[in-house]
Amino acid sequence: MCSVIIKTNLYREFILASQELSQFVGLLEQHRQLKRISAPVSPELEITEICDRVCKGSPESNRALFFEKPAGYDIPVLINAFGCEERMALALGVSQLEELNQRLGQLIDLRLPGGVGQAVGRGREILGALLSAGLRPRKVRKAPVQEVVHKEGAALDFLPILKCWPKDGGKFITLPQVVTRNPRSGVRNVGMYRLQVVDSQTLLVHWQRHKGGAEHERQAKAFRQEKIPAAVVLGGDPACIWCASAPMPPEIDEYLLAGFLGGAPIEFVNCVSQPLEVPAKADIVIEGYVDLADYRAEGPFGDHTGYYTPVELFPAFHVTAITQRKSPIYPATVVGIPPMEDYWMGKATERFFLPLIRIFMPEVLDIHMPAEGVFHNLVLVRMQKRFPGHAHKVIHGLWGLGLLMLAKCIVVVDEWVDVQNLSQAAWQALGNVDWNRDILVSQGPVDQLDHASYQPSFGGKIGIDATAKLPEEGYSRQWPEVVAMTPEVKQHISDLWKDLGL
Ligand SMILES: Cc1cc2nc3c(=O)[nH]c(=O)nc-3n(C[C@H](O)[C@H](O)[C@H](O)COP(=O)(O)O)c2cc1C
C-alpha cells in the first residue's frame, strides 16, 4: 500500500480548476506516482502483462502507467491511475480514503439535524438533495471534448482499445462512463460498464441486470422504445471516472457525486448527435444509441473474479459520432486475479458509502470488503451489539440494502474488532462461531458474474455471527475474556524497552 501524505487543500484547488485528466497525470507525476513508457507496447495483451506485474509488485513499482505511444496508435494510454490508496485519494481530492467517510458523515449530520429517524425511508431523496445543494450543473457551448468532431462514418479504429486477456472475445473499453437517461423520468445514470468492440461502429454494452443501465433497458422496452440514446465518456475529471463505478441509488445522477467531491459543479455540453449532455472536459465521447432490437453474444472476458466470464447476450451500441480533444488521453484498466486497480476504486466506494449505511443501520460501525473477496464474496462488519439477535438483524438488513443484496458472505464481529485488520477479523470469525448455531444460510440475488451459483444471478448466501453471544441467545456459559496485559506492566516495559536491546 502506498503511504498517504498529501497537502489536501492545495491539491483540491488544483483539481477544481481543472477537472481534466491531463492535469491529473501531471499531479501523479509530481507525487512520483506515474511512470511514462515510451516503448511502443501493444494494447493487445502486452499492456495487460505490464500492468498486472505492476499491480502485484512492490509498493515502489506500483505506479500509474502512461504509455506515450502504444504500438499502432497516436493516442496515449493511461492505466492503473487509481491503483493504490494514494492515487485513489488524489483522484477524489482527499488526503486519504477515510476522509470520504468523514465528509459525507459530516454533511449528513449538518443537514439532518433531526437525526437519522427522519432519513429512514427517504434516503434516496435526501442523498440527492445533499449532494446537489448549491451545485447546479453548468452548461457550456464550447467544450474541450468537442475540439474535434467526427460525425458521418465516425469509427472507433483510432482508439488504442485493449484486448486484455488471451481468451477475451475481442477488444474491450474498460474504464468508461456510460451515460443514459431513464426513459420514464429522464434522470441521468452513469455506469461503468465494459464495452466490447464488434466493428468500427458497433460496441456491446455489458450492463448487468442489477445495474442502472439495465433498468433503463427494461423501462425502454416497457415503453416500446427500441433505442436508448447513450454516450460513452472517456477520461476527463478523475472523480467523474470513479463515480461511474459508485453504486448510487437509482435515480440519483452519479455526476452530482463527482461535483460534490470536487466542490464545484461539473460542466456539461450537449452531445452533437444524441439528446444527452456529457462532461465538457472529458477526453473522448463516443455518442450513439443502444439498440434493443439487436442483441449479440458478448464475451468471454477475463473478469475481476479472476475467471473468464462466459458469453452472454447484451445489446449493441451503434456509434453516431465521436468527439474528442485535440490531444486526448485514453483511460483504461485491466481486471483479473485480485488485487488489481479496481480494488482501490471499490475501497473508495466502501469508505464513501459507510455513512449512508449508517443512516439506516447506525449500529454498523465499519465494513471491509477485502480484495480476495472480489467485492460481493465477503463483507466484514464491525457492529455495536445491543440486544439478542442483533447481529442477525444487521445481516438481514445489509442483504436488503442496495447492491449489498449481492453479498454472498457477511461476517459480523464486535465493536472492538478492527475489520480492516484481516488477521484480527479472521481470528474472531473463526474462534467465536459455533457452526451449528451462529450461521444464517439463505438464498437470494447474487452477482451476474458469480460462477458458483447453480443458476445465473440467484444463489446461496451465508451470514456468520462472530460476536460474543448473550445468555438470551441461548449461550448459558460465561463468554471468556480476551487476554490482555495490565496497563501498569505495559508502561513499565515500554520505559525499559530501549535498554533491553530488542
Ligand atoms: C473497473 C470496473 C469495471 C466494471 N465493469 C462492469 C461491467 O462491465 N458491467 C457492470 O454491470 N458493472 C461493472 N462494474 C460495476 C459497476 O460499475 C457498478 O456496479 C456501478 O455501481 C454501476 O453503476 P449503476 O449503479 O449506475 O448501475 C465495474 C466496476 C469497475 C470498478
Image (cartoon, helix red, strand yellow):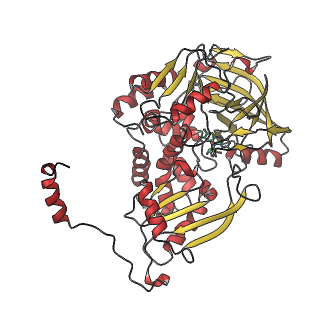
The residue closer to the viewer here, 157 or 220, is 157
User: In the rendered image of this protein, does residue 193 appear above or below residue 211?
Assistant: above
Residue 259 percent coordinates (x, y): 50, 36
Give ligand 1's quarter of the image: top right
Q: Which residue is drawn at 44% across and 63% down?
A: 427
Measuring from the top left, give residue 4's x and y in whole percent: 36, 37
**How many numbered circles does the render carry?**
0
Left or right: residue 104 versus residue 200 is: left
- Residue 241 vs residue 162: left or right? left
Q: Which quarter of the image is occupied by the N terminus?
A: top left
Residue closest to the eye, 292 or 438: 438
Residue at coordinates 58% horizontally, 61% vertically from top-left?
409
Q: Which residue lies furthest to the right in this view?
A: 293
- 481 or 11: nearer the viewer: 481
Res 365 quadrant in image: bottom left
Residue 128 visible: yes
Judge by depth and name the residue closer to the eye, 176 or 73.
73
Q: In this view, does 356 lie above or below 196?
A: below
For residue 137, say whether it is visible. no
Q: Position of residue 149 (x, y in %)?
A: 69, 16
Q: Height in image: 433 above or below 401?
A: below
Q: Where is residue 260 in the image (x, y as percent from the top left)?
A: 48, 39
Farthest-out residue, bottom:
476
The residue sitting at 53% across, 41% down in the picture is 345
